[in-house]
Structure formats: structure tokens, C-alpha cells
Image (cartoon, helix red, strand yellow):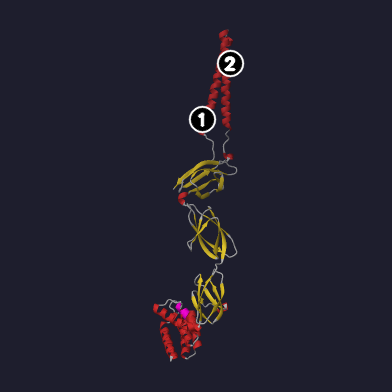
């Protein structure tokens, strides 16, 4: 009588399942195949070919997981008096998102099988580890946490999760007993040396949101891909993806960019191209050149090129501003001969000196004339005075002319124009 009642209940469950159909989220072709497998299973069940029907139902559920299919498999195993299989399929059924009424009925049906089976109640750290009983090649029996029905005796239990070492234990199981087992899987870790510019940047794991320390440091992380964030006061935070592998210790370098409001931008261009650009005596690059991170303040900026006269000046850099330098270096070969200045000043000076000497002779001649006047001494005095005047005037004119020419024709030198923009 009990068999007939359980059988009628099972047939009613299949009618409900037939109305529900296959999983709506599966692709059309997969859903159609799952529906076909279910219909074949239903027909085999009507013919009393229960094990063949179970095979079809399992195939249908593998293609499109469905709580009602799993429940029918569990009920069929219970009907066939195979409590261990029934218990495990009820456990699979309870892993679905069920209503409170469905869950209560499933838990009650599973609990009713407990006296006839040995059960291992497995929990793991981390959760959702795949569970294997006795032989790995038989496939997973589900994910933790899970209650697994087994035959009485000792059983090998293996828990496996990506990024963790397997947990492998032998578990004694007694019929009618529920044995709780908790397994902790050790993470597979690798090392990563992180270096930054500037040093002292904070390192954070984006996934966990945990602070991993400051650079430079050696991190121990689970193997796999990680996204790390690097931050430092006054610098733009950067996020980078790193890959950690077991048994390796690669070095990862990140250069942080200064925040725009704390730095000045330098742009240098001019003639000739390829000139060296030096800041405080340190070469930054070759023109045309741009540097986005100059510390604010006054710096000595220099530009030089082989065969050209260098330029150097003191340049003020403002935070959040751009400084532009347009230069032109002078080629000495293109510069006009400037020796005429020395000729002019030298000639003028020599004439002035000669005029002074002749003037002194004229004074002596005047003294001689005053002491003993004569026509010859007077003529000599007049000649000396005239010569002195000519020499003085000529020297002054030549020196003045040289000065004027120097002022109106300045020497060409290397130069630069500095402009600022915000």
C-alpha cells in the first residue's frame, strides 16, 4: 500500500514538471534538447523502466538545471529503495532557490532517509568548494556546504577550489549517523615585489579593499590575477592588474604621476632641434621637449648644443601652470667680426695719449718761450699746440664713433623667450 501511495505521488510530480517545461534562460537549442530528454524519461518511466528514465532525467537536468527534475530523480531513487542516491539528489534539490514550503518538504523527505544511510555533513573554507568522494574520476558530488550520503565505512573526501590546495581526508561513516566535517583549504600563494616612484606609496587590493602596505615591499598573494591600487599624497592614484604565480617572485614597478595642481609643465623648443635641455644641471631630454612634472619654484634652466653658444637662465615655475621656453642659440661662425671695437678703442686711446704727450711738450715750449722769447720758440709752441689739439680731437672722435657703433650694432648672442600659461 505504501508503494502505491508513493508511486501516485511521484506520478503527480511528473505532471507538474511537464507543465513547467525546461529552464527559460537556456538557449533555444539546449532547452529543446533538455525537453526532449525529459519527455523520453517520462515515457520510460510510464513503461516501468525506472533506471533508464533516471538517465534521461539526469541528462535533461545537465543541459538545463531544473529543481523539479532533480526532485523527481530523488523521488524515483526513493521509490526504488536506493536511499543513498535519493538522499544526495534531495541535497541537490535543496541547493535550488525554493519556497519555504518546498524547502520544508524537501528537508523532511531527506531526513526520513537518514536512518538508512551514513551521512557526511561537509563545510569548507572557502565556501563553494567542489566535493569528491573516494575517486576523483567519478566527478564532483556537489559543492560545499553539503550533506553527502555514503555507504557505511571509511571514505576518502576531497575538497577542491580554484586558487587553493586540495583538502584530502579519510572520514569514517556509520549508518544512521550524520558526521560533521569541516575542511580548510590552504590558499596557493605566490610572491610579488612591488616598487614605486615615489617610494612609500600605499598598496591596496581592489577586490578585498584591504591595505597591503607601502612600497617597496614583498607581497604574498593568492595565485591568479589581482588588481592593485597605488596612491600617495600629491600623486594621482593608479590601478594596475598583476598576475601572481606559485614559486615566482617578479618585481612590479609603477610610476605615479603628480597631481596637476601640484606641478608645473615645461615645454621647450627652438633652434637648433635636438639641443640638450638641463634643469639644475640635470639633463631632462632633447628639444623639442616637454616634461609634465616640474616641481614648482625657481630653477636654473640651460640649453646647449655642440657648435653653438649655450643659453642659461633662472626660470620660475608656478604650480598648475605651463612654462614655455622658445630659444635660439647663436652659431659663432655666423657672428660678425667684432675686432673692430678693439681697433677703434685702441686707436682712439693711442691718439688721446699722443695728444697728452704733445700737450706736455707744448707746455715745455711755452716755458722756454717765456724765458727766452724768439720767433723760433713761438713757432714751435704754435705747432705743438695745434698738433696736440688734432690728436685730442681725433682720438675723442674715433673713441666716440666706436662707442656709438657698438651701441647701435649689439653682438648677437644666444637667447630665449619664457612665457607662462594657466
Residue 373 visible in the shown view: no
Element assignment for label 2: helix
Residue 397 to residue 250: above or below: above
Q: Residue at x 57, y 31 (%)?
A: 340
> In x, y percent, where is residue 381?
56, 13
Circle 1 sits in a helix, a strand or a loop, which is it? helix
Magenta part of the protein: which range?
Answer: 90-94
Is label 1 in contact with label 2 (beta carbons under 8 Å)?
no
Q: CA distance from mark 1 to mark 2?
A: 32 Å
Within the magenta stretch, is there residue 156? no
Q: From the viewer's perspective, is residue 6 above or below residue 290? A: below
Residue hosting label 1? 404
Residue name at image x 54 percent, y 62 percent: 242
Residue 333 in the image, given as x and y percentages of width and height: 59, 39
Left or right: 209, with 377 as reference point: left
| Circle 1 Cα neighbour tier, 10 Å, few/some/many (<14 / 14–19 / ≥20) | few
Where does label 2 land, which residue? 361
Residue 106, x across and y down, in percent: 43, 81
Query: Quarter of the image containing the N terminus?
Result: bottom left
Question: Which mark is first along the chain, 2 or 1?
Answer: 2
Q: Could you classify mark 2 by the number of other residues whose Cα lies within 10 Å: few (under 14), some (14-19), or many (20 or more)?
A: some
Q: Main secondary structure of the magenta part?
A: helix
Quadrant of residue 352 in the image?
A: top right
Amino acid at each position: 500500500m505504501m508503494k502505491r501511495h508513493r508511486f501516485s505521488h511521484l506520478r503527480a510530480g511528473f505532471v507538474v514538471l511537464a507543465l513547467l517545461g525546461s529552464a527559460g534562460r537556456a538557449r533555444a537549442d539546449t532547452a529543446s534538447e533538455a525537453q526532449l530528454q525529459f519527455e523520453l524519461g517520462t515515457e520510460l518511466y510510464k513503461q516501468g523502466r525506472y533506471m533508464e528514465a533516471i538517465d534521461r532525467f539526469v541528462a535533461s537536468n545537465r543541459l538545463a538545471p531544473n529543481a523539479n527534475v532533480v526532485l523527481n530523480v530523488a523521488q524515483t531513487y526513493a521509490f526504488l529503495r536506493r536511499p543513498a542516491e535519493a538522499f544526495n539528489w534531495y541535497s541537490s534539490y535543496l541547493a535550488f532557490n525554493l519556497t519555504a514550503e518546498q524547502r520544508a518538504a524537501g528537508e523532511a523527505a531527506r531526513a526520513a532517509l537518514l536512518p538508512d544511510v551514513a551521512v557526511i555533513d561537509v563545510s569548507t573554507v572557502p565556501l563553494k568548494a567542489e566535493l569528491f568522494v573516494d575517486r576523483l574520476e567519478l566527478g564532483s558530488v556537489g559543492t560545499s556546504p553539503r550533506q553527502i550520503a555514503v555507504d557505511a565505512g571509511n571514505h576518502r573526501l576531497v575538497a577542491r577550489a580554484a586558487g587553493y590546495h586540495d583538502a584530502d581526508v579519510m572520514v569514517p561513516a556509520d549508518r544512521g549517523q550524520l558526521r560533521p566535517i569541516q575542511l580548510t583549504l590552504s590558499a596557493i600563494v605566490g610572491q610579488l615585489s612591488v616598487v614605486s616612484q615615489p617610494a612609500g606609496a600605499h598598496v591596496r587590493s581592489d577586490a578585498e579593499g584591504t591595505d597591503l602596505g607601502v612600497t617597496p615591499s614583498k607581497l604574498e598573494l593568492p595565485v591568479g590575477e589581482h588588481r592593485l591600487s597605488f596612491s600617495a599624497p600629491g600623486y594621482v592614484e593608479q590601478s594596475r592588474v598583476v598576475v601572481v604565480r606559485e614559486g615566482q617572485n617578479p618585481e612590479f614597478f609603477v610610476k605615479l604621476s603628480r597631481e596637476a595642481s601640484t606641478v608645473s609643465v615645461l615645454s621647450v623648443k627652438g633652434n637648433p632641434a635636438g639641443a640638450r635641455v638641463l634643469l639644475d644641471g640635470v639633463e631632462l631630454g632633447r628639444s623639442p621637449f616637454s616634461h609634465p612634472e616640474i616641481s614648482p619654484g625657481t630653477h636654473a634652466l640651460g640649453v646647449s648644443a655642440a657648435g653653438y653658444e649655450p643659453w642659461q637662465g633662472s626660470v620660475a615655475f608656478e604650480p598648475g601652470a605651463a612654462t614655455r621656453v622658445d630659444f635660439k642659440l647663436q652659431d659663432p661662425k655666423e657672428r660678425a667680426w667684432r675686432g673692430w671695437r678693439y681697433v677703434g678703442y685702441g686707436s682712439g686711446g693711442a691718439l688721446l695719449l699722443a695728444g697728452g704727450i704733445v700737450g706736455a711738450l707744448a707746455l715745455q715750449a711755452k716755458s722756454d718761450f717765456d724765458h727766452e722769447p724768439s720767433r723760433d720758440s713761438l713757432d714751435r709752441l704754435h705747432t705743438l699746440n695745434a698738433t696736440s689739439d688734432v690728436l685730442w680731437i681725433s682720438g675723442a672722435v674715433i673713441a666716440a664713433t666706436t662707442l656709438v657703433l657698438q651701441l647701435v650694432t649689439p653682438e648677437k648672442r644666444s637667447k630665449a623667450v619664457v612665457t607662462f600659461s594657466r
